[in-house]
Amino acid sequence: MLRDLSDSSLLKCKGFVDGKWINSARQERFAVRNPATSQRIAEVESLDAHDTRQAIAAAQKAMPAWQALPARERSAVLKRWFDLIMENQEDLALIMTAEQGKVLAESRGEIAYAASFIEWFAEEGKRVYGDIIPAPQTDRRALVLKQPVGVVAAITPWNFPTAMITRKAAPALAVGCAIVIKPAAETPLSALAIAELAQRAGLPAGLLNIVPTGHAKDVGDEMTQNPIVKKLSFTGSTPVGKMLMKQCADTVKRTSMELGGNAPVIVFDDANLEKAVAGAAGSKFRNSGQTCICANRILVQAGIYDAFVEKLVETVGDYRLGNGRDKESTHGPLINPKAVADVTALVEDAVAKGATIKIGGVHSTLGGCFFEPTVLTDVNQTMRLAREEIFGPVAPIFKFETEAEAIALANDTEFGLASYVYTRDIGRVWRVAEGIEYGMVGVNETAITSDVIPFGGVKESGQGREGSKYGLDDYLEMKYVCMGDLNAYDVAP
Ligand code: ADP
């Protein structure tokens, strides 16, 4: 499957700790499977709590020298890492498609997106400014220094196996931290490949450690209990995030949490229909619906509802499900059989409560992890898919009458990550953007992410922001320095 990599040494199956490729202390491995074929593509070392402790100790040892470097020198290493990732984009995309399933075009896109965080933070890391506060006494000065938070632990998901790592590792490394990362067990190969490139870029040993494991809880326990770790950055489901936050409380670690979403796409009667359908479909079906900012509920005003449904069904009818490596495929499989079962259960629940399947709605005849792209109407807030993150290619289209109703519906969830609104009315744009409780609002646009914007959620979707100039703050501590006794002394002749 991965025999056609131009650089086969990017395919790593061991842990990466203190600059070395290591076997697990337990001498255990876990299988990585291609979700398109269910074939085993690799056996990866399954590191445990003991190995994680070693990685954390290595990070602690490596950090002081790195932190002491001028930001420009850290930046130079990060830029080489960025260049190497882009030079190896095709191989990295092939690895990603093999273990994650997304179509190659999306994998290439993710590699460029992942690399962009490294380039961005290589630059931003030079701009960690402190502050001087006008002091309340004449013989004092009040200063604020910004310093790296300390050793960082990161736990990342399988839906963006590379970007969710660089979005954390790049700002951490740029400001002088060292980091230990546990990738998802479904997608460790993407993580290990970029670690190899970091080493080739000249990143000193111990600053970036990758702990692949089939024992997420053991590794997570070590990361959250070890007092050396000063910060945990997590991207994943809300229940696991809540549990990790509780675990971090014992040692009062700082946390950044990118958790689940329940994104509304609100389409008003005055919207540009073509663009609204294209935007909603793009957001809903990207990565086969497996992103935390995927449209979860499409809310369409009554006057445009029928036309919207017809056009969306037409758009979805043109999709071609298939192995992400095949050129004709527009959409790939779900990550594993459990994901197929979960999505099937959500559709069955909706249908039992009155939903109508306009297209799809079933496990694909391709079998395996493929689920047909689906559009549902006659849906309402009592259905599970209105409350839960669907994480699959199912688009429920809700009908609303008034702006107030749309805002209330959009806010009727504990989540608050991304949201989208389509309208040409400038007053409504402001009222809705200010009235909905989300960390991100796309107005007449659903492809809203990039390295330069602050990505993050409110309510139970998390805390902290990744990317942008604000993304550095999550890895910095503020230190106040009071300089006293500054008045002039008479100097004796
Ligand atoms: P998903 O449903 O998308 O897989 P999870 O929250 O389960 O979301 O997974 C996100 C990341 O959290 C993965 O790296 C996974 O291995 C990790 N994880 C899951 N359970 C735990 C746990 N108990 N402790 C630490 N990490 C965990």
Image: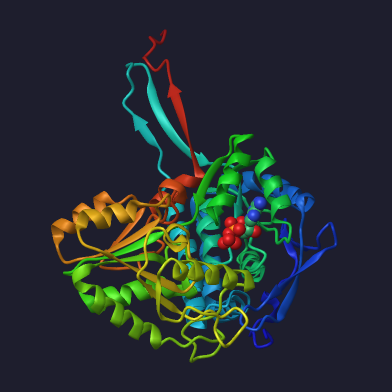
Q: How many marks?
A: 0
Q: Residue at x 56, y 72 (%)?
A: 84
Against 234, residue 274 (above or below) is below
Q: Residue at x 14, y 63 (%)?
A: 425
Q: Quadrant of the C terminus?
A: top left
Rendering quarter of residue 305: bottom left
Q: Residue at x 45, y 66 (%)?
A: 116
The location of residue 148, given as percent across then percent down, is 53, 43
Question: Which residue is more in the foreground, 310 or 75?
Answer: 310
Question: Which residue is more in the foreground, 37 or 170?
Answer: 37
Against 388, residue 396 (above or below) is below
Ligand 1: give its quadrant. bottom right
Q: Is residue 179 left or right of residue 144?
A: right
Q: Residue at x 76, y 50 (%)?
A: 49
The location of residue 133, given as percent across then percent down, is 34, 29
Rendering quarter of residue 145: top left
Against 214, residue 127 (above or below) is above
The coloring applied to the image is rainbow
The location of residue 388, given as percent across then percent down, is 47, 59
Q: Is residue 32 left or right of residue 367?
A: right
Q: Is residue 369 something one can see in this rendering?
A: yes
Question: Which residue is more in the foreground, 206 or 238?
Answer: 238
The location of residue 258, given as percent across then percent down, is 49, 53
Q: Is residue 207 something one can see in this rendering?
A: no
Q: Quadrant of the N terminus?
A: bottom right
Q: Is residue 492 left or right of residue 32?
A: left
